[in-house]
RNA sequence: GCAGGGGUAGCAAAGCUUGGUCAAAUGCGCUAGCUUGAGGGGCUAGUGUCUUAGGACUUCGUGGGUUCAAAUCCCUCCCCCUGCACCA
């Protein structure tokens, strides 16, 4: 089949008929959206999953008779697009190569995309083209960009609503920061695309010299065990005045590096330089014991980490222990044990170093030992000294931290856990405490409650994600909602700030409903009273609703609430939860969302797609290579909804081959149909009734599977199992009766493979024999199974036949026979069925025999019954189900005699009853069981 | 650390809720045969071990337990993946 000409042909037809541009007020509605794409590069095959899943659902609902709206738009808000344009302007070689090698964009084209707007338009056009080629049933009239003036008006209205509700707050807040660009940095701003990780640590203050020595630690609970402090003898130190919020000013000793970095977090003033030697001459005062402790040199202290000064706990920190050992001071500075851990003595750090063979502070294994000991002591270690005695490491840590901060003996500082992180500009990133930061306060308890209420009424797919939503609602707090730069919408309460990307994408589903009307009205004519009217039904005295306003109001009321929201599952913990929050903040309960559907990602030949691996398959390239319907099918059906699906060549070719196979059968069916008189075939054979029983059972289950997004089992049934059935049917029967099959099958797979379906539908001709006539598959009704044709006895019969054939082959194999002259089947005597039923019922030989005595037929052959019962009991599970009786078994075998003979190379096939088996076969015949006839091959 | 998910035959993956028909679907791969001018494609059989009559035995991360019966239920341990925000 030529998939490529198919796309163009049917997409043109759909467009001509405007099938995807629904009008309001027509029948039951269904409104669904998928997370809009971010056009900073072309889309790859992974992007196709969410939209294809959504489209399959949209097409299914349409065939169920719903008036379906599926819109889309482009999200251009935020800084990644700016960063991308900047990299292009800087002629970033790596980026040019990725575009060239992976996406086939020539460097001359890339070079032109230095303006963010041009970049957006270029990539969004590319993405749109890909979506059109994928055949998505999108209403394109509603497309917009989040930097469009009309959308800006909408978002500003949304933020004023949030503000009025009291959900907008202001405060200060730490962010990863580039001191050279003077901007917060995200993963896309850093060298190697590393995500900067913020971490809060405790800096304990030791009085020394003219001020305090702050030492950062992850383990404040070990403070009682501090014997000394460490200074890097090669680092440059300064004395600086610090004014922390809510605490009195202090003079602190820091490395120059720490001073530079921490001045972004605290108000710091340098007083003077201090040489390391000078520090080493001081004594420090232990904040708990008030004892004087020495300050010693150590090479492992990194000047750029934390404050550049470290406290020493030789009993519990391998580095400290090793450094003291290296200085030969262990004797004069004995380690002080703080935590008691099973399996360890008075100096766990020393013991673990010995156990692991760690030599000195420069040994790589020291890090490993530190982690191992920390993990152990955190859970199993018990604090020895009051007031923390008996607590484990984790509990003590929190308590001590709290106590120290309250006593102003420690301050909390933020560091980058994965430092050093470098900005693309080359500068070292730091943590900056941003003042006057605006937030959306998702921490508001009443709002959380409302959101939980909304969630409780929503359908969440996959169902297991509900707990993720609940958890997310629980831990969300203030979310910074503005940034200094980026595309998008200006923050209405401070127009120097831009609303950031996760905050302007929580309510746009409502905007879609009116997007096409708003475009007509124009941004300059839009104000809050318009949105108040359309979304909230509020009339303001100074603004009388126009016809356009009324039309917009009608659209919103018709389409809302949103029936289904789709995205990949990584958005649950932010976007999707924000989306529910914002809906509850602004709309009444009847407009709260109904459902979310989250899918996994797509891997490529079993591996995660990544730029560095170069295994990204651009969507349009894939379409050109494999065809739309093949991609739609593979991407959505090769894994369960929540799991990652895999795109691989073998699977894609497998799907294409099966489609081609079906097409061949269809061609033949159409040929045969022309020869024969039209009309339903009558007098179907057993095997063809079997085939239709299977088909109708699948069609019956299909609707539910679409509704539940069980796309993998559904796809398996519709394509793989169906093709296997077709092959068995054609093996069993010389003539095939497939017209009805194709009519049902074509419509049942149409949501998955809309182009193939249309082609098949057209080939079958306008006059339908089994289905309601409809010009296009896309606008046909989803088929309802003819349940009268479903017959489990037929399925049992074919299964029996296959079992019997397998047994014959097995016997032949054991006898090393290549061919046979005859195969004789001896069907069990009817009384055995009775005995079987008793065994299944009682599962106990004694009870079976007692019952058998009451039945004349069984009573007269008790030894045989006992023997049979013993045999059946061995595999009790095998006989709990329904079974065919002797007559049915015989009928199946008799009917298939010719077929069996052909299968066994023309052997004579004989079917006998146990009762009338000839004497020489009597022993064999006696072994016949229900479901397992005796087989004699000769 | 917190939260969620997972470990099944060469690979991928279903089964686990509701224990028995599970040596365990299905696809891929592999082996053999047929078909085809070759290849691709298609068809058939096989693909844990042993077995000259359809059988037996051992398997579903580890170690225990419950049960007549466990991949499925309970407990221990080991290992892997994802997310933890200001970033789309």
Image (cartoon, rainbow, N blue to C red):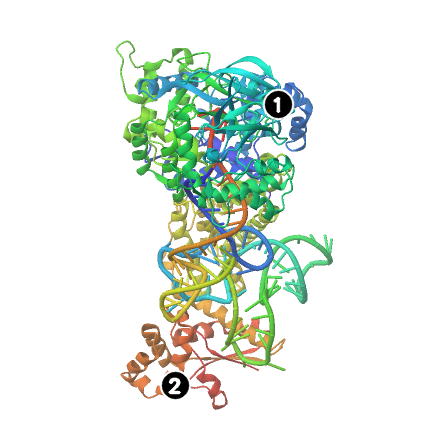
Mark 1 in CB contact with mark 2 (< 8 angstroms): no
Q: Is residue A305 left or right of residue A443?
A: right
Residue A370 sits in quarter: top right
Q: Residues within 10 Å of mark 2 (few under 14, many from 20)?
A: some
Q: Vertically, is B22 above or below A515?
A: below
Q: Are marks 1 and 2 on the same chain?
A: yes
Percent coordinates x, y for residue A93 in the rendering:
68, 25
Q: Residue furthest top?
A: A542
Q: Is residue A121 visible?
A: no
Q: Vertically, is A822 above or below A699?
A: below
Q: Is residue A363 visible?
A: yes
Q: Which quadrant is the N terminus of chain A positioned in?
A: top right
Percent coordinates x, y for residue A100 in the rendering:
67, 29
In this view, the residue in front, A56 or A397, is A397
Q: Chain of mark 1?
A: A
Percent coordinates x, y for residue B60 in the rendering:
50, 59
Q: Which is more N-terminal, label 2 or label 1?
A: 1
Disc 1/disc 2 C-alpha distance (Å): 86 Å
Q: Secondary structure at mark 1?
A: loop
Write the residue at 28% across / 9% down: A542
In this view, the residue in front, A636 or A464, is A464
Q: Residues within 10 Å of mark 1 (few under 14, many from 20)?
A: some
Q: Vertically, is A754 above or below A886?
A: above
Q: Residue furthest front?
A: A332
Q: Chain of mark 2?
A: A
The residue that label 2 is drawn on is A864
The residue that label 1 is drawn on is A424
Q: Secondary structure at mark 2?
A: helix
Q: Is residue A411 left or right of residue A353?
A: left
Q: Which quadrant is the C terminus of chain A positioned in?
A: bottom right
């Amino acid at each position: 089949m030529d998939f490529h000409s198919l796309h163009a042909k049917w997409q043109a037809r759909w467009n001509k008929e405007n099938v995807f541009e629904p009008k309001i007020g027509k029948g039951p509605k269904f409104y669904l959206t998928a997370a809009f794409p971010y056009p900073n590069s072309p889309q790859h095959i992974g992007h196709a999953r969410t939209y294809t899943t959504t489209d399959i659902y949209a097409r299914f609902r349409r065939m169920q008779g719903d008036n379906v709206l599926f819109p889309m738009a482009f999200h251009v808000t935020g800084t990644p697009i700016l960063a991308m344009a900047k990299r292009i302007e800087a002629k970033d070689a790596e980026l040019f190569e990725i575009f060239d090698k992976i996406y086939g964009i020539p460097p001359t084209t890339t070079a032109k995309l230095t303006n963010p707007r041009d970049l957006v338009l270029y990539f969004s056009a590319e993405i749109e083209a890909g979506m059109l080629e994928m055949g998505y049933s999108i209403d394109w009239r509603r497309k917009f960009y989040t930097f469009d003036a009309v959308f800006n008006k909408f978002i500003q209205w949304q933020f004023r609503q949030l503000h009025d509700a009291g959900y907008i707050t202001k405060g200060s807040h730490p962010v990863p920061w580039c001191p050279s660009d003077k901007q917060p940095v995200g993963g896309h701003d850093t060298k190697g695309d590393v995500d900067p990780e913020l971490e809060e640590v405790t800096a304990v203050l030791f009085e020394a010299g003219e001020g305090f020595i702050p030492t950062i630690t992850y383990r404040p609970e070990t403070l009682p065990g501090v014997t000394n402090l460490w200074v890097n003898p090669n680092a440059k130190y300064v004395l600086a005045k610090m004014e922390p919020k809510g605490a009195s000013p202090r003079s602190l000793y820091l490395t120059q590096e720490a001073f530079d970095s921490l001045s972004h977090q605290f108000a710091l003033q340098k007083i003077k330089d201090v040489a390391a030697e000078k520090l080493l001459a001081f004594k420090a005062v232990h904040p708990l014991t008030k004892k004087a402790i020495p300050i010693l040199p150590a090479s492992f202290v990194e000047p750029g980490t934390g404050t550049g000064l470290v406290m020493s706990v030789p009993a519990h920190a391998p580095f400290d222990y090793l450094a003291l050992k290296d200085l030969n001071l262990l004797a004069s500075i004995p380690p002080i044990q703080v935590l008691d851990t099973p399996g360890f003595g008075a100096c766990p750090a020393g013991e673990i170093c010995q156990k692991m063979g760690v030599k000195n502070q420069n040994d790589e294994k020291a890090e490993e030992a530190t982690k191992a000991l920390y993990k152990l002591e955190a859970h199993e270690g018990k604090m020895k000294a009051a007031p923390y005695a008996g607590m484990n490491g984790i509990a003590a840590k929190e308590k001590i931290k709290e106590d120290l901060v309250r006593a102003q003996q420690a301050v909390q500082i933020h560091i980058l856990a994965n430092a050093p992180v470098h900005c693309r500009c080359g500068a070292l990133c730091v943590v900056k405490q941003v003042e006057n930061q605006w937030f959306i306060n998702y921490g508001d308890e009443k709002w959380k409650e409302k959101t939980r209420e909304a969630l409780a009424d929503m359908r969440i797919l996959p169902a297991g994600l509900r707990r993720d939503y609940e958890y997310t609602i629980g831990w969300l707090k203030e979310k910074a909602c503005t940034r200094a730069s980026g595309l998008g919408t200006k923050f209405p309460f401070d127009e120097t700030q831009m609303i950031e990307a996760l905050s302007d994408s929580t309510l746009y589903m409502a905007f879609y409903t009116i997007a096409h009307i708003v475009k007509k009205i124009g941004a300059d004519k839009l104000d809050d009273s318009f949105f108040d009217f359309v979304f909230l039904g509020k009339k303001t005295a100074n603004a009388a609703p126009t016809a356009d306003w009324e039309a917009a109001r009608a659209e919103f009321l018709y389409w809302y609430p949103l029936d289904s929201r789709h995205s990949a599952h990584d958005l649950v913990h932010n976007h999707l939860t924000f989306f529910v929050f914002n809906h509850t903040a602004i709309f009444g309960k009847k407009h709260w969302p109904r459902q979310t559907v989250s899918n996994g990602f797509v891997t490529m030949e079993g591996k995660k797609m990544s730029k560095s691996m170069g295994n990204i398959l651009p969507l349009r390239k894939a379409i050109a290579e494999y065809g739309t319907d093949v991609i739609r099918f593979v991407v959505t059906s090769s894994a369960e909804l929540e799991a990652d699906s895999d795109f691989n060549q073998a699977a894609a070719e497998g799907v294409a081959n099966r489609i081609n196979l079906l097409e061949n059968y269809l061609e033949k069916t159409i040929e045969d149909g022309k020869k024969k008189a039209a009309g339903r075939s009558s007098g179907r054979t057993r095997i063809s009734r079997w085939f239709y029983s299977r088909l109708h059972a699948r069609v019956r289950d299909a609707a539910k599977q679409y509704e539940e997004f069980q796309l993998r089992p559904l796809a398996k049934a519709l394509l793989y199992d169906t093709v296997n059935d077709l092959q068995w049917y054609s093996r069993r029967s010389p003539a095939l009766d497939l017209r009805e099959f194709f009519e049902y099958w074509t419509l049942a797979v149409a949501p998955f493979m809309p182009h193939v379906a249309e082609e098949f539908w057209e080939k079958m001709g306008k006059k339908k024999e089994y289905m309601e006539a409809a010009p296009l598959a896309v606008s046909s009704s989803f088929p309802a199974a003819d349940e009268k044709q479903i017959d489990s006895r037929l399925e049992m019969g074919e299964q029996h036949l296959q079992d019997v054939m397998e047994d014959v082959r097995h016997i032949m194999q054991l006898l090393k026979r290549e061919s046979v002259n005859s195969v004789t089947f001896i069907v069990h005597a009817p009384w055995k069925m009775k005995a079987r039923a008793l065994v299944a019922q009682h599962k106990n030989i004694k009870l079976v025999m007692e019952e058998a005595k009451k039945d004349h037929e069984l009573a007269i052959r008790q030894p045989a019954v006992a023997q049979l019962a013993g045999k059946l009991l061995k595999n009790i599970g095998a006989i709990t189900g329904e079974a065919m009786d002797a007559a049915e078994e015989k009928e199946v075998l008799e009917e298939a005699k010719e077929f069996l003979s052909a299968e066994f190379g023309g052997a004579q096939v004989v079917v006998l009853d146990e009762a009338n088996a000839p004497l020489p076969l009597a022993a064999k015949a006696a072994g016949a069981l229900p479901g397992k006839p005796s087989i004699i091959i000769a």
